[in-house]
Image (cartoon, rainbow, N blue to C red):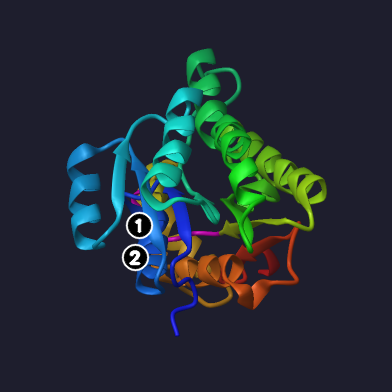
């Protein structure tokens, strides 16, 4: 039996990378999806591929858009069971060089959006038999990288917010974070631009893992499915790394 049969889930950052991989697997496991992203063309194509899914284009840094996502889920499917929050940007540049607007945008998309959508979703998640919030954080919550101050700060704060919400809303809602290491998505190639030789930086990241390879969106999606499904029914307030062992290397 599908692990998420008839469960309604909002997925942000759904049109590429890890978010797309999560959307595809959750749909295969029976979930009814509200897909969020900025790119209308990619979003429409994904919704068409994942039959029965609904794409709502917009900017997760805006509170009203997050409220719209929740309202759409409830209006279209009658309930809301889970959030899978994957939207994120890098905000590259050291503290001196990074513009204030880039700092604020990175914090708004990577952190404030989690607060916004949770604020509107929690009253509905509390009515679910298995209310669930899953935040896609990063090993950057625990390990620092050059020229990523806004990214590291936002990911560390998102883990702290996860832990607080897990305490606040137990036992009705489980709240967890997955913390990927180097995963082969467009984001890692953008991140590598912070280094003198981007291709070499990505290659070195793969070699730095104990498993000697980059992760894939499918790797991360399998962990997301576990944390959203009843298979992890006694797990909450946890930041689970999925990094090929790089933090132990």
Q: How many angstroms separate mark 2 from mark 1 (CA)?
A: 6 Å
Residue name at image x 74 percent, y 45 percent: 165
- The overriding secondary structure of the stretch rendered in magenta is loop
Residue 24: numbered disc: 2
Q: SS at mark 2?
A: helix
Q: Position of residue 138 (x, y in %)?
A: 59, 51
Task: Assign a secondary structure to mark 1.
Answer: helix
Q: Position of residue 92 (x, y in %)?
A: 48, 31
**Residue at 57% from the left image edge and 72% from the top image edge:** 226
Is residue 15 found inside the magenta-colored segment of the image? no
Residue tagged 1 = 20
Residue 45 point in image, percent of width and height: 18, 52
Vertical side of 109 occupied by 137: above or below: below
Q: How many marks?
A: 2
Do residues under tags 2 and 1 come within 8 Å of each other at their CB atoms?
yes
Q: Residue furthest right?
A: 167
- The quadrant holding residue 194 is top left
Pick the residue in front: 98 or 150.
150
Magenta range: 181-186
Dot 2 crowding, Cα within 10 Å, few <14, some 14–19, many 20+: some
Q: Position of residue 104 (x, y in %)?
A: 54, 20
Left or right of 166, for residue 198: left
């Amino acid at each position: 039996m599908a692990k998420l049969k008839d469960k309604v889930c909002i997925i942000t950052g759904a049109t590429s990378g890890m978010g797309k991989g999560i959307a595809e697997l959750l749909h295969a496991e029976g979930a009814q999806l509200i897909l969020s992203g900025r790119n209308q063309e990619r979003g429409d194509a994904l919704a068409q591929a994942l039959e029965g899914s609904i794409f709502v284009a917009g900017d997760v840094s805006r509170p009203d858009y997050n409220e719209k996502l929740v309202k759409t889920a409830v209006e279209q499917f009658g309930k809301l069971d889970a959030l899978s929050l994957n939207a994120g940007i890098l905000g590259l540049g050291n503290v001196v060089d990074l513009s204030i607007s880039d700092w604020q945008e990175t914090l708004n998309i990577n952190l404030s959006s989690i607060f916004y959508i949770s604020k509107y979703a929690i009253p509905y998640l509390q009515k679910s038999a298995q209310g669930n919030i899953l935040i896609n954080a990063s090993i950057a919550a625990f390990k620092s990288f050059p020229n990523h101050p806004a990214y590291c700060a936002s990911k560390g704060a998102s883990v702290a917010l996860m832990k607080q919400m897990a305490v606040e809303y137990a036992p009705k809602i489980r709240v967890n974070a997955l913390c990927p290491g180097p995963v082969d998505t467009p984001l890692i190639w953008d991140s590598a631009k912070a280094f003198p030789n981007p291709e070499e930086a990505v290659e070195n990241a793969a070699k730095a893992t104990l498993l000697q390879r980059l992760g894939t969106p499918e790797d991360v999606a399998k962990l997301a499915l576990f944390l959203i499904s009843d298979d992890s029914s006694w797990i909450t307030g946890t930041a689970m790394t999925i990094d090929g062992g790089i933090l132990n290397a």
